[in-house]
Image: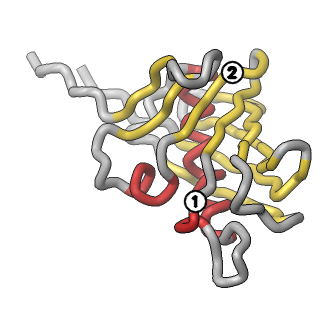
Amino acid sequence: MSSPVPPRFICEPDPASPGWMRWDVMDHGRYNHVFIGPMLVRRESGATCRVRIDIAERHTNAGGTVHGGTILGFADVAMFAALYVLTGVDPIGSTTIDLSTQFVGAGSPRKPMDAVVELLRETRRLAFLRGKILQGERLVAAFSGTARKPSQPSA
């Protein structure tokens, strides 16, 4: 009999942000926490989830706008946070199969950034998602991606 796996991420109500869940990894040495940082998540509708990060100086490029790598990393992490909120699929052990991104505007370092992620279809092994990266009503990027869900342990 195997012992239970300790939780590797946090998804719990955020007392400072009513209606939002706090999302972070337990190991604060990991990419998600060190670079992207803690996020907020909430279900918007049956198949849509909003994921939010606060932009910090570490997220910017030499020109003072949000670095494209930050936007790509945020889109990737947001897909898995949304998949968990929408379906309960454990993000640990899931992998990105593909991620296509269109950059349509510069991101401001002075405003939070939201990913509005829609689950288009889910199969036994895959999830197909698309989303928009927004600051307020301003579109910064659009993306679509495929996530492979974790393998189920064999009995």
Q: Is 3 positioned to the left or the right of 22 in the image? A: left
| Residue drawn at the location 77% of the way across and 62% of the way down | 107
| SS category of the residue bearing label 1 | loop
Image coordinates for residue 140, horizontal then vertical, percent: 83, 58
The first of marks 2 and 1 along the sequence is 2
Quarter of the view holding residue 102: bottom right
Image coordinates for residue 11, horizontal then vertical, percent: 46, 25
Image coordinates for residue 96, horizontal then vertical, percent: 55, 51
Numbered marks: total:
2
| Residue drawn at the location 61% of the way across and 48% of the way down | 54
Q: Residue furthest left?
A: 1
Q: Residue furthest bottom?
A: 62
Q: CA distance from mark 2 to mark 1?
A: 25 Å
Q: Is 47 positioned to the left or the right of 76 in the image? A: right
At label 1, which amino acid type do we have? Ala
Query: Dividing the image into 4 quarters, which one contains the C terminus?
Result: top left
Image coordinates for residue 9, horizontal then vertical, percent: 37, 33
The answer to whether the residue labelled 2 contacts the one labelled 1, judged by CB atoms less than 8 Å apart, is: no
Q: Is 132 positioned to the left or the right of 124 in the image? A: right
| Residue drawn at the location 9% of the way across and 16% of the way down | 1
Q: Is residue 30 above or below residue 121?
A: below
Q: Is residue 4 above or below residue 109?
A: above
Q: Is 90 positioned to the left or the right of 21 in the image? A: left
Q: Which residue is mark 1?
A: 56
Q: Nearer the viewer, residue 78 or 63?
A: 63
Q: Which residue is mark 2?
A: 43
Q: Is residue 27 above or below residue 122?
A: below
Quarter of the view holding residue 39: top right
